[in-house]
Image (cartoon, helix red, strand yellow):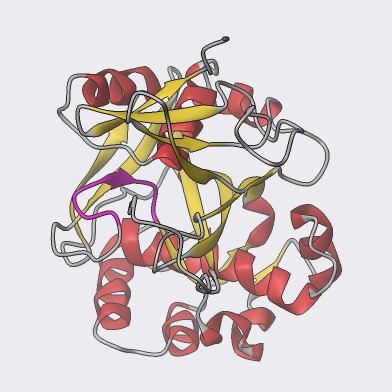
Amino acid sequence: MSTSPEPSVPSRPRDAATVVLLRGEPLEVFLVRRTGRSVFMPGAHVFPGGRLDPTDADPRVRDRSVGRDPAGAAAALGETDDPTRALALFCAAVRETFEEAGVLLGETRAAAVDLAQARAELAAGAPWPDVLDALDATLRLDWLVPIARWVTPTVEPRRFDARFFLARAPRDQRPSHDATETTEGGFFAPAGALERAARGQIVLPPPTLRTLEWLEAAGSVESAFARVGSGPPPLVEPMFVRLDAGLVALVLPGDPLHPRRERAIEGPTRFVLRDGRWRSEAPTLA
């Protein structure tokens, strides 16, 4: 993340979807490590995800999707202004999970080797609707539960409006990184990932860090889903500030230094950059 001065005209954030893929008891979550060549969060461990693609709204993709219609998708996201886009975001979450983790959140009779081949063809440029047709796949959008919406601070030249979804990893599929945009992938206990980040062994961007903190209290997949609120997912719009000590902080809604006074999510209201890594902290009272 950048810490340079605010641009005169912030770039418009791109719609995106991120999937928090869970398994097991005790709970584990799948993380991938972004390549060091990435222009956005290079080398960081993140959840699978990426930006919305025009094919996510393709009628052929929509026709292979069940579990949510446009109105239901819009209601689940709390974004009723554009139901078509809302449904496409759910479809994007499925596609990105397949691209970056090799997991198809849906139903198909295809064997593991066929899924791997289809993933390779998609990476090589095959149209997503054609890949789904070849697999005779049905996308299960009801397997995805929205949990948060993070918008990249305006200081960043590349900004995303990322909807975070919770999903169970299918038992009959083995996730793996794509070896193109990501260089590693694996399941982590939330506490284990946080400990490794504290030791400087891995890098966790603030949205990933806070989501892992939220998951740390859940001992199982069922418990994690039970912790999801009944209303629309919270909108989190962080902003950069410089503290008196010369440190850079990313403050969240509810922090004394954030213009929005109402808290958006659980946990401390800021991340402070110390020794090259973000730490979740509460503001110090004067």
Main secondary structure type of the part rendered in magenta: loop
Q: Position of residue 130 (x, y in %)?
A: 45, 90
Residue toward you, 76 or 171: 76
In the image, residue 188 lies in the stretch drawn in magenta? no
Q: Which residues are magenta?
A: 41-48
Q: Position of residue 187 (x, y in %)?
A: 30, 35
Q: Is residue 274 visible?
A: yes
Furthest-front residue in this view: 244
With 47 as the anchor, is 182 left or right in this view?
left
Q: Say which residue appears at 32% left-offset and 42% top-offset.
A: 31
**Is 238 located above or below residue 272 in the figure?**
below
Residue toward you, 53 or 134: 53
Q: Quadrant of residue 228?
A: top right
Q: Say which residue appears at 23% left-offset and 62% top-offset.
A: 178
Q: Quadrant of residue 142?
A: bottom right
In the image, residue 42 lies in the stretch drawn in magenta? yes
**Is 263 located above or below residue 39 in the figure?**
above
Q: Say which residue appears at 80% left-offset and 73% top-offset.
A: 83
Q: Quadrant of residue 116?
A: bottom left
Q: Is residue 107 visible?
A: no
With 17 as the anchor, is 3 left or right in this view?
left
With 162 as the anchor, is 258 left or right in this view?
right
Residue toward you, 145 or 24: 145
Q: Position of residue 232 (x, y in %)?
A: 79, 46
Q: Position of residue 122 (x, y in %)?
A: 32, 80
**Quadrant of the image containing the C terminus:** top right
With 189 as the anchor, is 176 left or right in this view?
left
**Is 9 located above or below residue 169 in the figure?**
below
